Structure formats: C-alpha cells, structure tokens
Image (cartoon, rainbow, N blue to C red):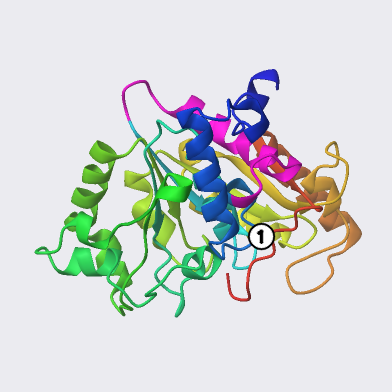
Amino acid sequence: MENLTKLAEPSSRAQSPGSPSATLYAERQHARKHSGVDAHLVSLVATDSYEAEQYRRLRLAVERMRKPGESAIVGVCSPVAGDGKSVTSINLAGALAQDPKARVLLVEIDLHRPYTAIVDYLALDNPAGPGLVNVIQDPSLALDEVIRHLPAFNLSVLLGGSHSTSIYEILESDRLGELLAEMRRRYDYIVLDAPPVVPVLDCRLIEKWVDGFIVVVAAHQTPRRMLEEALNHLSPEKVMGLVFNRNDRPSTYTYGYDYAYAHGYGRPMRRRRAGRRARMLRQRIKARPQIGTIEASQRAEEKQGQ
C-alpha cells in the first residue's frame, strides 16, 4: 500500500514555482476546472482524493498484469446494466494516465446504447462524430481520424461512433482485430468500456483480443444469480477480478454473505436454497481476486441504462 501513494499526482505545493513540471501541473489543473467533466470522474478532477486512491488500486492491478515491453487491453464489464462500469472504466483510464509517460486509450465498445456515456461524463463535443463503428466499416478511415486527444488528462478516447444494427458482425470482424493490434502498437494501455455480460454476447465475442476483464458489481444491488451467470459466460482465465461499487459496508463484508438470504432473481428465495447458492457463489468469488472496492462516499452513480 505504501507504493500506491507514490502513484498519485503530486500536489502543486511539492513543485518548485518556476519548474516545467509545476507549469504543466498548473495548466492541467486549470483545464480540469473548466472542462465540464463530471465530478464522479475523481481520477481526472480530484486526483488527491481518497476516492481516486481506490481507482489507483485498480491501476496497480493492471500495471502488474501487463508484461514488460508489451501493451495491455483490459475490458471493464458488469453482469447487467447500471452497475457502474462506465464510471469505473473512465476512472481506471484516468488513473493509468496519471503517469505522464503512459500512453492510454479509452475505447467505447458498448455499441448497443443509443447515447454515449463517455461523451456525457467527459463533456465531449460532437457526440455524433465518427468512432469505432465507422473505422471498422470504412477501411479508408484511419485511427488518427477518429481518436480524440485530451491533453489535460494525458488521455485519448475512441467513441463508439455511428449506430449499427450489425453489432455481432462488427465485433466478429477481422477489421476489429486489426485495429486492436494497431492500438497495442501505439498505446501502453487500452481500456475498453464493454457491454454488460448477461444481456448480450459482446464480451464473449471480444475476449479473444482482451488480456483480462474487470467485472464491476454494484454492492447490495446486482442480483446474485446475475453475477453467477456473468462468471459462467466469461472464460475463468480472462477474469482479473471483481470491483465492488458503491460499497458502504466494512471491507470484510463479502458479497456472498451480503446476499445470502436477502435477494433472489425476481423473487425472494427460500432460506435453505438461498444459503446453498450463497455458499457456492462465495466459493467462486474466492477464486476471483477482489481488486477494488469503491466506497459509498464516492457513489459513482451511472446514468439510467448503463
């Protein structure tokens, strides 16, 4: 934990007044204050906060997963919509980008939504501009033409782009594999804001290109059976671990116990059956490391439908 504190962006008090690093820090702080970025993106707008430190725990897990000299593609997903995956993916990308030497790309690959969460949270212009779908469907487009750069945050962003009714074919295409390979050559970290696992097949389609998935679970909200189903759909070797979002219980309080007798999927479960299912889920969760807990004080509430 001592090393984690060194990953935080240094405060302006620690900089010599006339140094280049102090000037760059001041310029970025000014840009952040006037960017219109959502306050829940603490890795971008409140880097010295306790909540931002929780996302640096995720950063540490991703940095340790990355092989020396290679890039890493990490998918951030959730069992169902509304668990907080988009806020988590943006904050993870922001935490990785706090290293001024890191080349970080945030990619919106949840193509089912009629609006883009990343645009809303980052207050980006031209939400209808070209993005991932366009560069896949039109080989004449280059990545440089669709990637947006945010110098104030040392972050690059690739939005989903045009709406498509052929998402399965897009995610299965060789073109997507070629683009992800190009992203690996150009960036150190590629963070994918992926779709929820249970409602759609998308995560199963892209997992061949992903080094690992972080599964975001909304504490006291995500149905237990949905988490079980999500873990069943993902290859075990691809699951980096779980992130418990909006957690206001002590850290020793496990997800399995929390749901032991309280919730079923759609209706209450009998006590004995609920206890048996809870024990099975606890065993499965023990096999997946808990790599983060986002405390209730942060409460990165996603907009409806995410």
SS class of the residue under badge 1? loop
Helix, strand or loop: magenta stretch = helix
Given residues 248 and 104, the one toward you in this image is 104
Q: Quadrant of residue 263?
A: bottom right
Image spot of residue 228 (x, y percent): 64, 53
- Residue under the image location 61 percent in, 51 percent down: 45
Task: Check disc 1 and report the residue beneath it.
Answer: 39
Q: Is residue 76 left or right of residue 287?
A: left
Q: Is residue 92 left or right of residue 57?
A: left
- Residue under the image location 80 percent in, 58 percent down: 220
Q: Is residue 130 left or right of residue 281?
A: left
Image spot of residue 200 (x, y percent): 46, 67
Instruction: Tell me which amino acid carries mark 1.
Output: Ala
Whether residue 215 is visible here, answered yes or no, is yes
Image spot of residue 218 (x, y percent): 71, 57
- Residue under the image location 18 percent in, 69 percent down: 137
On-image quarter of the C terminus: bottom right
**Crowding near the residue tagged with mark 1, few <14, some 14–19, many ≥20 C-alpha atoms within 10 Å:** some
Image spot of residue 144 (x, y percent): 21, 55
Residue 144 drawn above or below residue 7: below
Residue 49 falls inside the magenta stretch: yes
Q: Residue furthest left?
A: 140
Whether residue 288 is visible here, answered yes or no, is no
- Residue under the image location 72 percent in, 45 percent down: 51
Q: Quadrant of residue 262?
A: bottom right
Figure label count: 1
Given residues 241 and 61, the one toward you in this image is 61
Please report the bounds of the magenta region as a residue range.
45-70
Residue 24 drawn above or below residue 88: above
On-image quarter of the N terminus: top right
Residue 244 drawn above or below residue 185: below
Residue 146 falls inside the magenta stretch: no
